[in-house]
Image: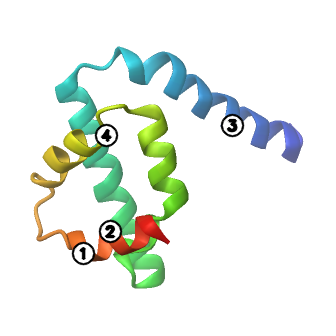
Amino acid sequence: MKDKEFLQKIIDDQNRFWTEEYPKLNRDEKVKYWLASTHKGMRTQGEAFNDEYSEFSKGWYEHAISVESDFEEIFKEAISNIGFEFDWEEYSKRIQS
């Protein structure tokens, strides 16, 4: 498989998840998805860049609200279970710039 084909497969798989699989999740499953995704992302970014909040950006946020109409409420519920104190002020700065 060539690099372009490999990258296209990743894009196609992501698109398929957001258009076919994610919409079928119930609310609890969506909360669990955002919790796991956020926890993993923050941990990975923290280990790689020593900045857990670097995973959040305006582009990330715009994508999130484009795929989940109830993102704000689902994300708040997910973060309430993250297991550490989440810095909402830092998060807000990242998604606005």
Inter-mark Cα distance, 4 to 2 = 14 Å
First along the sequence among labels 1 and 4: 4
First along the sequence among labels 3 and 4: 3
Inter-mark Cα distance, 1 to 4 = 18 Å
Circle 1/circle 4 CB separation < 8 Å: no
What amino acid is found at the position of numbered circle 1 in the picture? Glu
Q: Which mark is residue 71?
A: 4
What amino acid is found at the position of numbered circle 2 in the picture? Ser
Residue 4: image quadrant is top right
Residue hosting label 1 = 89
Q: Is residue 6 above or below residue 43?
A: above
Q: What quarter of the picture does the N terminus occupy?
A: top right
Compared across the picture, whether 31 is left or right of 1 comes to left
Return the x and y of residue 96 as percentages of the image width and height: 44, 67
Residue 28: image quadrant is top left
- For the point 35% across and 66% down, the residue is 42
Residue with the most extreme front position: 96
Viewer-side residue, 54 vs 67: 67
Q: Secondary structure at mark 4?
A: helix
Mark closer to the observer (3, 2): 2
What amino acid is found at the position of numbered circle 4 in the picture? Phe
Return the x and y of residue 37 as percentages of the image width and height: 35, 49
Q: Secondary structure at mark 3?
A: helix
Q: Is residue 61 above or below residue 47?
A: above
Inter-mark Cα distance, 1 to 2 = 5 Å
First along the sequence among labels 1 and 3: 3
Compared across the picture, whether 24 is left or right of 75 comes to right
Q: Which mark is residue 92?
A: 2
Residue hosting label 3 = 11
